């Protein structure tokens, strides 16, 4: 049984990461919390499906079609679709009602299915057509240690409008995902607490249970009833 996933970073300001995967003998996975929304294409038993998946605010169990192949584009903070606000997608997904082996419908128009190797070409087409827009201030606000040079309320509104989440929620989710990666590499829980600024080990444990669906011990041992969805180092240029 396996859930094999390959992923890579992107040089596009609209894209956080591109991934593809294949499942064999896996019925369910633990879908960990994520502060990003994404577009996913999957093929299963001769059928093609396309869906927009919103940010996830807690870990959950998700069904995995056996012997399916998927391609996903995870969008950067601040990227949104004017016709489909991200706030409507939090903890849910919307599947395209019209998908074929070659194309699907998004924003009332037909688009060729994106491919892993050239996903940025597909994204550029969406940008030129106005299906995707970007607010650079949002990414700056999420990444920066201090507020950008505009009013705090204005920043909060713009972050919520383009991500569906508060700045605080984004940082909680991104921090615990980083913690999960470090623990999976064998880091000691106390070291992770100090490195990422948790109050103490119980604080870390609560965050892991809520957002990742695993304990620190399970992550360090690679244990779990089902595989985890994609986790990666956000500062790793190789995607390894």
Image: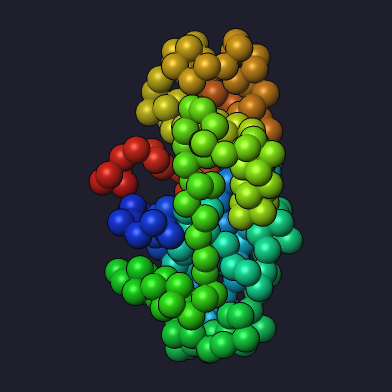
| Residue 169 versus residue 134 in the image, above or below | above
Question: For residue 118, which quarter of the picture?
Answer: bottom left
| Residue 203 versus residue 169 in the image, above or below | above
Q: Position of residue 17 (x, y in %)?
A: 40, 55
**Residue at 57% across, 62% down:** 80
Number of disc labels:
0
What kind of colouring is applied to the model shown?
Answer: rainbow
| Along the viewing direction, whichever of 187 and 25 lies nearer the viewer | 187
Q: What residue occupies the far right of the structure in this picture? A: 88
| Along the viewing direction, whichever of 21 and 196 lies nearer the viewer | 196
| Along the viewing direction, whichever of 181 and 149 lies nearer the viewer | 149
Q: Position of residue 12 (x, y in %)?
A: 35, 59
Question: For residue 211, which quarter of the picture?
Answer: top right
**Residue at 52% across, 17% down:** 197
Q: What residue occupies the far front of the structure in this picture? A: 150
* Quadrant including the C terminus: top left
**Residue at 34% across, 38% down:** 235
Q: Is residue 117 left or right of residue 34?
A: left
Q: Position of residue 154 (x, y in %)?
A: 65, 44
Residue 224 seen in this snapshot: no
Q: Position of residue 190 (x, y in %)?
A: 49, 11
**Residue at 71% across, 56% down:** 87
Residue 85 seen in this snapshot: yes
């Amino acid at each position: 049984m396996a859930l094999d996933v390959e992923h890579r970073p992107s040089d596009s300001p609209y894209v956080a990461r591109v991934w593809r995967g294949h499942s064999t003998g896996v019925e369910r996975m633990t879908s960990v919390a994520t502060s990003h929304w994404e577009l996913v294409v999957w093929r299963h038993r001769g059928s093609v499906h396309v869906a927009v998946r919103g940010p996830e605010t807690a870990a959950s169990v998700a069904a995995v079609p056996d012997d399916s192949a998927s391609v996903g584009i995870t969008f950067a903070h601040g990227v949104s679709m004017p016709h489909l606000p991200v706030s409507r997608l939090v903890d849910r997904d919307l599947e395209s009602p019209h998908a074929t082996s070659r194309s699907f419908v998004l924003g009332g128009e037909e688009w060729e299915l994106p491919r892993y190797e050239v996903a940025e070409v597909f994204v550029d087409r969406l940008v030129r057509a106005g299906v995707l827009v970007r607010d650079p201030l949002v990414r700056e606000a999420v990444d920066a240690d201090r507020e950008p040079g505009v009013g705090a309320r204005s920043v909060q509104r713009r972050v919520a409008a383009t991500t569906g989440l508060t700045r605080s929620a984004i940082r909680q989710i991104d921090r615990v995902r980083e913690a999960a990666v470090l623990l999976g590499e064998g880091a000691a829980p106390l070291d992770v607490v100090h490195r990422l600024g948790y109050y103490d080990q119980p604080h870390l444990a609560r965050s892991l249970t809520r957002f990742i669906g695993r304990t620190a011990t399970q992550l360090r041992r690679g244990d779990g009833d089902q595989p985890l969805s994609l986790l990666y180092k956000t500062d790793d240029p190789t995607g390894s």
